[in-house]
């Protein structure tokens, strides 16, 4: 009885709790259905979207009715405020109860009179810029397919009526390159299973192109995917052309497929260039040889192909399919110009010409694994931006077009290649696949003769490799001291025991990725920087020293933990030598913490830092501390090869950065002692080689977009200068990324000079032979950093100035002769 009474009480309590929850949910849903609730929901939705995209979303009114949401006058603007899209009314009906069955079901979407104005220019497409994410999402691991449906996303009906799309290339002010589609009507239904990738899709589209090229726009698509089985039917009309396609194919057994495609587009004039014609005709039936004929002609490039075969007889050759295609690169300069004119986007300059030929064929039995393939290409010149490639010849052959070919070879030669400032020449690549053995050999003639070798064997399950590598260049040869194991397949990837050694130098790498988790370890030991090849490091840097690096990574891919330790001994770069650098960095929980130490004959630096990994995505705190205990100005200038060296002295620096990336604070102090300047060559040889200047202390602070400067200078020969100044400037992370024009920053403040001896100023100019006297000032500072103005009392007593004359201008006749 007692237990029964307790159970009854517990059930009553549980009933009260459930009733309270139901009442709260019901009350919340009831409130959302009111105009007040709709307005609150509209504000939340607009705010969240605008916090995630670079553009701006506007919704005039929102109505919520349980399973139905209606929005009115929706507008999307690009970052500059231009209208990208406008929708008069949109209605979305959902079935919330289906969530309990692992199904996201949208029963109806109706959109009235949507208008899309696409503008493509130097900054890119306005729609892409409007919808670009403010924060870049980390890459997601590929989803592993299963045989189960998993979660299902289902759209019963999507209706669009009265739509229009206007496209402007190069800006909305250029009507000659405008494409205008009107009276668009779209009907879509879809079902997608996230587990096995099964898809059902139906699309119906109608409309008109009302500006040349004019014509009807109609497309009907019915597609179904079940694993490797694909069923498709499509037909339509587009800008005077026609499309008809069907397919009932198992992608793993093409010989039994039933498919056909017939697409024809006439030659069209778009953005001042001729595009087309384009034609693709193909047929495939079970038990028959497929046929394919294609022509794609765009400015500067033509692709042609033809394939088919003859039926075998009882005593004749077996039935086989043969296909040949040619890609003719007639003039890539014309291609680049046409694409730029059509899209309005900024593309790197293109240029070059050449041909690539492909032939595929073999018996129909066992197709496509039974087919052979041969590719040949000859490209005399190819230019993409600043990269220029000359004399490209390629030939590749495969005896079986399958995931594991029985016999495949590749031969690629490049006469010369220039990428940036480094020229390469004599590139020769050969590779071969025989049974399960893979070999590759890469040779480079210049700028340094080098050779890379690879030997690998595929595992019996086709999901792994055993490999060894070698790399040789003048003075150094790297070889694998053990065989590495590379495994792949499913949602896992691993590399074990990869290492290269060269005398005392070694490189080792191990890593594994399973699902969303990753572990990796990279170790460089006693790496001699002076031995790095010229194609990897610019020789003018004159790198040297002994480098050690250890990096360990673990955790989730989108939020890993990484620990790195770096040590450089006897380092050298250009004029800097005997450098010692130690660094320890930890990345964890989206933060980067670490220390840095630099020791050199002219410098002692220690730094500590705690920073957010993505300063633009969070308001997390920032803590940076940098201490330069010793900086010898003369030695530092000589190291950077400043000729002639005009300065000397000792400097100490303390820097503190706090706050956040969005609202930083800065406190920096620079102290200079025993500062000197060298005597210019124009001065008499009797003058001392160096002139003492004095001591200086500078204090710079920054907070709330205001930078303040306090400078105190005392000259060796007598006198002082005090400067108090400030400037309005945005040093936040968004402000810095937008760019700061330092010369135009406004400055205000006060300058006070007392009996300042100015004799040392002559050392800063070869034309000033003598400057003497004392300056007293009590002035207000205004203007900009590039053009400061002193307003007030400025006096120069006992002044003396002797300067050499400027070089006379060339005679009038000489100037005239210099003109082109």
Image: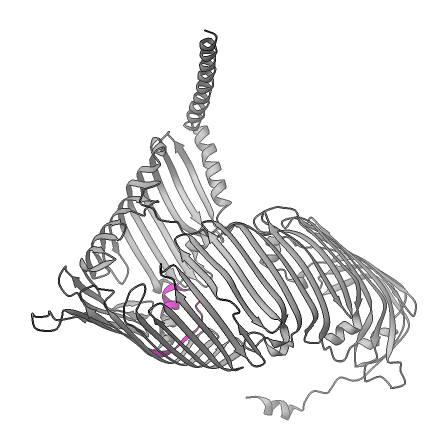
Q: Is residue 137 visible?
A: no
Query: Which residue sits at x=63%, y=76%?
Result: 530
Indicate the quadrant where residue 336 lies: bottom left
Q: Position of residue 502 (x, y in %)?
A: 58, 73
What is the span of residues highlighted in magenta in the rendered image? 339-354
Does residue 551 appear left or right of residue 414 in this picture? Answer: right
Left or right: residue 445 versus residue 545 is left
Report the side of 156 relative to 477 (left or right): left
Task: Please say whether residue 342 is one of the residues in the magenta stretch.
Answer: yes
User: Is 527 above or below relative to 555?
Assistant: below
Q: Is residue 817 above or below residue 38?
A: below
Q: Position of residue 341 (x, y in %)?
A: 38, 68
Q: Residue at x 34, y 55 (%)?
A: 166
Q: Nearer the viewer, residue 501 or 351?
A: 501
Image quarter (top left, top right, bottom left or bottom right) of the N terminus: top left
| Outermost residue toward the left in this view | 314
Please give the name of the residue rendered at 60% of the width and 49% of the height, measured from the top-left corner. Answer: 588
Q: Is residue 390 above or below residue 285?
A: below
Q: Quadrant of residue 354?
A: bottom left
Percent position of residue 526, x then y: 64, 69
For the question of whether residue 191 can be seen, the reply is yes
Q: Is residue 429 magenta?
A: no
Q: Is residue 180 left or right of residue 514?
A: left
Position of 569 relative to 708 (above/below):
below
- Colouring used for the render: one colour
């Amino acid at each position: 009885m007692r237990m029964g009474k307790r159970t009854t009480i517990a059930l009553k309590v549980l009933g009260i709790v459930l009733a309270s929850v139901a009442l709260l949910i019901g009350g919340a849903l009831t409130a959302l259905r009111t105009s007040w609730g709709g307005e609150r929901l509209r504000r939340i939705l607009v705010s969240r979207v605008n916090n995630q995209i670079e553009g701006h979303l506007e919704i005039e009114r929102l109505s919520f009715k349980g399973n139905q949401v209606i929005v009115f006058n929706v507008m999307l603007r690009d970052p500059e405020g231009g209208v990208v899209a406008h929708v008069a009314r949109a209605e979305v009906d959902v079935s919330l109860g289906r969530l309990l069955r692992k199904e996201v079901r949208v029963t109806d979407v109706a959109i009235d009179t949507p208008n899309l104005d696409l503008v493509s220019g130097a900054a890119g497409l306005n729609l892409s810029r409007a919808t670009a994410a403010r924060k870049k999402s980390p890459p997601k691991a590929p989803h592993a397919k299963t045989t189960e449906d998993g979660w299902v996303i289902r759209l019963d009906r999507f209706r669009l009526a009265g739509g229009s799309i206007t496209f402007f290339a190069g800006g909305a002010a250029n009507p000659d390159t405008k494409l205008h589609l009107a009276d668009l009507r779209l009907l879509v239904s879809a079902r997608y299973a996230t587990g096995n990738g099964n898809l059902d899709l139906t699309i119906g589209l109608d409309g008109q192109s009302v500006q040349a090229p004019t014509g009807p726009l109609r497309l009907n698509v019915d597609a179904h995917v079940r694993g490797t089985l694909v069923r498709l039917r499509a037909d339509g009309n587009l800008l005077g052309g026609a499309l008809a396609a069907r397919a009932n194919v198992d992608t793993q057994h093409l010989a039994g497929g039933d498919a056909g495609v017939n697409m024809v587009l006439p030659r069209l004039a778009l953005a001042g260039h001729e595009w087309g014609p384009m034609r693709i005709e193909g047929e495939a039936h079970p038990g028959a040889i497929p046929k394919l004929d294609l022509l794609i002609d765009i400015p500067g490039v033509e692709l042609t192909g033809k394939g088919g075969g003859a039926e075998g007889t009882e005593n004749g050759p077996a039935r086989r399919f043969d296909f040949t295609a040619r890609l003719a690169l007639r003039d890539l300069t014309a291609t680049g110009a046409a694409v730029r004119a059509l899209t309005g986007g900024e593309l790197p300059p293109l240029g070059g010409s050449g041909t690539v030929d492909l032939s595929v064929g073999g018996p129909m039995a066992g197709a496509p694994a039974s087919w052979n393939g041969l590719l040949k290409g000859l490209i005399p010149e190819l230019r993409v931006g600043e990269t220029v490639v000359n004399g490209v010849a390629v030939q590749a052959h495969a005896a079986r077009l399958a995931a594991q070919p029985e016999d495949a070879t590749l031969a690629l030669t490049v006469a010369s290649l220039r990428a940036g400032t480094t020229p390469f020449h004599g590139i020769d690549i050969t590779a071969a696949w025989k049974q399960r053995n893979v070999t590759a050999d890469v040779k480079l003639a210049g700028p340094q003769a080098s050779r890379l070798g690879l030997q690998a064997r595929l595992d019996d399950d086709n999901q792994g490799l055993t490999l060894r590598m070698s790399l040789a260049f003048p003075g150094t040869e790297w070889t694998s001291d053990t065989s590495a194991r590379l495994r792949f397949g499913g949602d896992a990837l691993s590399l074990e025991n990869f290492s290269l050694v060269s005398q005392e130098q070694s490189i080792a790498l191990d890593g594994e990725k399973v699902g969303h988790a990753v572990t990796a370890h990279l170790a460089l030991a006693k790496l001699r920087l002076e031995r790095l090849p010229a194609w990897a490091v610019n020789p003018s840097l004159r790198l040297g020293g002994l480098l050690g690096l250890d990096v360990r990574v673990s955790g989730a891919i989108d939020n890993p933990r990484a620990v790195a330790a770096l040590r450089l001994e006897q380092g050298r770069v250009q004029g800097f030598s005997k450098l010692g650098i130690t660094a320890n960095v930890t990345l964890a929980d989206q933060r980067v913490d670490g220390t840095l130490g630099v020791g050199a004959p002219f410098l002692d630096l220690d730094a500590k830092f705690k920073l957010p990994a993505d300063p633009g995505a969070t308001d997390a705190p920032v803590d940076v501390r940098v201490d330069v205990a010793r900086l010898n100005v003369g030695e530092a200038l000589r190291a950077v090869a400043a000729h002639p060296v005009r300065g000397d002295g000792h400097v100490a620096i303390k820097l503190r950065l706090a706050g956040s990336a969005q609202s930083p604070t800065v406190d920096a102090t620079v102290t200079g002692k025993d500062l000197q300047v060298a005597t210019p060559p124009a001065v008499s040889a009797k003058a001392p080689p160096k002139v003492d200047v004095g001591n200086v202390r500078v204090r710079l602070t920054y907070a709330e977009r205001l930078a303040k400067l306090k400078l105190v200078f005392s000259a060796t020969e007598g006198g002082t200068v005090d400067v108090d100044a400030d400037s309005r400037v945005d040093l936040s992370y968004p402000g810095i990324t937008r760019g700061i024009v330092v010369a135009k920053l406004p400055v205000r403040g006060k300058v006070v000079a007392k009996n300042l001896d100015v004799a040392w100023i002559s050392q800063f100019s070869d034309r000033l032979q003598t400057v003497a006297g004392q300056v007293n000032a009590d002035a207000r500072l205004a203007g900009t950093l590039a053009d400061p103005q002193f307003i007030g009392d400025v006096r120069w007593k006992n002044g003396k100035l002797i300067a050499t004359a400027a070089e006379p201008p060339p005679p009038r006749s000489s100037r005239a002769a210099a003109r082109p």
